């Protein structure tokens, strides 16, 4: 594709992109398709002969766009939103064009140093002290994996070099602590790091789904007494199900007492720390060894972008540095940052570019205003739910996610009887499914205290009050078709 052909195809693609963003609301957030219905639309074997870009783009319009789950739709209120903002998309285009690989300073001086700039801008925006350095990864799962690898390294057993197998000197097993509500990525990290799922001790939560620090202290004491070796604690600010907030300061006290690595998972809610008057939820996180915040969740950055901050970069390096001759550069004489030494993978994307473009285009003020608006939308919905006798909030709403269920006033007194509880679960699943099938909005669910909870998660840049109001209207209309005998 010579530059002129590229120019004309790229202009056509930009038109496709702009048309897509312009027509989002005319689409069903989740299209009416069934699993397995798409693969047969594509040839079973790859094309032998080249095809013109016009044909390929026509097929994109026919086969790809209509069969996507439309995460960019303003009615996307499921999971946690991932918005591709306009400036973020432009950033992705330039990233792809420059094709940088900031694995070494020399393989991308600008990729390396702009990452340092952007990481520090974000640190400042979050109100964290300069002792935090860090890097960008693809996802919070990877960031947490890296953090727990560092925790494993910091326990002193030189695990990077010697591994874990047959290590009697490490006692009866390394242990990690996280609340019963912590994200599955913590458990996956334990699996991946050879600690095993059994190494993760799930600490009970209170009725607000927040970790109990006393229970954490008791669990650590019991493990120490049994000869196990605690290495790290994960506190979550904004859990996945209910967005609950673990008491980070009290957890930091326990972690410090035992010399454990403290990792704070603020993948979703971390950006709220950009609002100085909302920082109470984060009290104590400045004492963490590492923190993850995902710009690709609530900072309107297209997938992927996860920020891993740490006060202990040198431990990440000890966990992952391996420099074969072909990666050795003369720059090592000077103190350069070769980012590959801090993570499991070698090749890296130039994610800093889209963040730099976005941070400038919105400005911190623009980002704060949008996050504030989402917090207000969720607060309004929570107030409506609380005021309706047939509906129930299933968790506090510290951020922009509301967990609710239909529980008609007539059965309130019997709601905990197993048969009624079961019928309520079935009815709420049907309500959510009915709403999703309508295509105007898209919701997801969880279980809280064993009960089916519908989640309305506001976080999409394009969501306005009318979309959240409509979701509430549709939920009530779907509930009107249900009855609990
Ligand atoms: N941590 C929390 C609290 C989350 O809610 C999620 C995903 O929703 C993750 C981690 C994992 O995020 P990612 O998809 O970036 O790995």
Image (tube, rainbow, N blue to C red):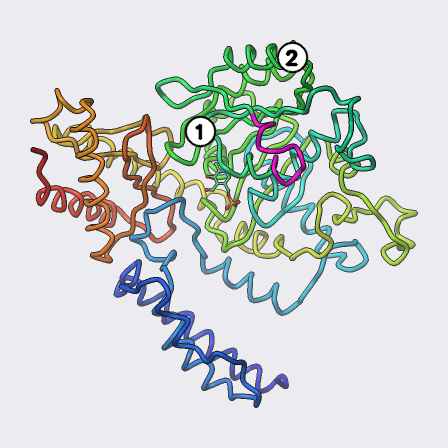
x, y percentage for residue 180? Answer: 46, 26
Residue at the spot of label 1: 181
Instruction: Name the disc covering residue 226, or none.
Output: 2
Question: Helix, strand, or loop for circle 2?
Answer: loop
- Local crowd at mark 1 within 10 Å, few (<14), some, or many (≥20)? many
In percent of width and height, residue 179 lies at 49, 24
Disc nearest the viewer among 2 and 1? 2
Nearest to the observer: residue 349 or residue 42: 42
Mark 1 sits near ligand 1, with its Cβ under 8 Å away: no
Residue 5 occupies quadrant: bottom right
Q: Please name whichever residue, 266 or 324, is drawn nearer the observer in this view of the structure.
A: 324
The quarter of the picture where residue 167 lies is top right
Is the residue marked 2 within 8 Å of ligand 1, measured from its CB?
A: no
- Secondary structure under tag 1 reads loop
Task: Write the residue at 36% across / 21% down.
Answer: 208
Quadrant where the image shows the C terminus: top left
Q: What is the magenta range?
A: 190-200
Q: Per the image, is 198 magenta?
A: yes
Q: Which mark is residue 101?
A: none
Label 2 Cα crowd, 10 Å radius (few <14 / some 14-19 / many 20+) = few
Q: Which residue does the image show at 85% across and 49% down from the upper left? A: 323
């Amino acid at each position: 594709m010579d530059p002129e052909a590229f120019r004309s195809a790229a202009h056509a693609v930009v038109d496709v992109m702009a048309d897509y963003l312009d027509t989002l609301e005319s689409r069903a957030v989740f299209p009416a398709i069934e699993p397995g219905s798409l693969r047969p639309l594509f040839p079973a074997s790859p094309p032998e002969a080249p095809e013109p870009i016009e044909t390929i783009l026509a097929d994109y319009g026919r086969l790809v766009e209509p069969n996507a789950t439309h995460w960019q739709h303003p009615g996307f209120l499921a999971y946690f939103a991932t918005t591709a903002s306009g400036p973020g998309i432009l950033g992705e285009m330039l990233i792809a064009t420059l094709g940088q690989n900031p694995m070494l300073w020399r393989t991308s001086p600008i990729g390396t140093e702009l990452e340092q700039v952007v990481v520090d801008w974000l640190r400042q925006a979050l109100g964290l002290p300069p002792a935090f350095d860090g890097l960008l990864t693809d996802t919070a799962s990877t960031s947490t994996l890296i953090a727990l690898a560092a925790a494993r390294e910091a326990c002193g057993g030189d695990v990077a070099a010697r591994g874990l197998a047959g290590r009697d000197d490490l006692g009866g097993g390394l242990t990690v602590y996280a609340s019963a509500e912590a994200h599955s990525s913590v458990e996956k990290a334990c699996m991946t790091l050879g600690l095993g799922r059994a190494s993760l001790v799930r600490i009970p939560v209170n009725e607000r789904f927040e970790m109990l620090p006393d229970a954490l202290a008791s669990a650590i004491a019991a493990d120490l007494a049994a000869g196990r070796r605690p290495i790290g604690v994960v506190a979550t600010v904004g859990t996945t199900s209910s967005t609950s907030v673990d008491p980070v300061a009290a957890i930091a006290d326990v972690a410090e007492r035992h010399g454990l690595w403290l990792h704070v998972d603020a993948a979703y809610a971390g950006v709220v720390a950009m609002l100085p008057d909302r920082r109470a939820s984060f009290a104590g996180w400045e004492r963490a060894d590492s923190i993850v915040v995902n710009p690709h969740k609530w900072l309107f950055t297209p997938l992927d972008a996860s920020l891993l901050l740490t006060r202990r970069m040198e431990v990440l390096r000890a966990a992952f540095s391996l420099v074969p001759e072909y990666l050795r550069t003369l720059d090592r004489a000077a103190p350069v940052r070769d980012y590959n030494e801090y993570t499991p993978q070698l090749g890296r994307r130039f994610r800093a570019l889209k963040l730099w473009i976005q941070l400038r285009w919105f400005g911190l003020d623009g980002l704060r205003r949008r996050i504030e608006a989402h917090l207000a939308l969720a607060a309004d919905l929570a107030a409506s739910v609380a005021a309706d006798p047939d509906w129930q909030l299933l968790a506090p709403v510290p951020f922009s996610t509301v967990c609710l269920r239909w529980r008609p006033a007539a059965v309130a007194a019997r709601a905990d009887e197993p048969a009624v509880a079961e019928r309520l679960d079935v009815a709420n699943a049907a309500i959510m499914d009915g709403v999703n099938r309508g295509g105007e909005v898209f919701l997801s669910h969880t279980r809280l205290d064993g009960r089916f909870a519908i989640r309305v998660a506001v976080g999409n840049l394009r969501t306005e009050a009318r979309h959240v109001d409509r979701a509430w209207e549709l939920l009530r209309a779907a509930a009107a078709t249900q009855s609990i005998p």
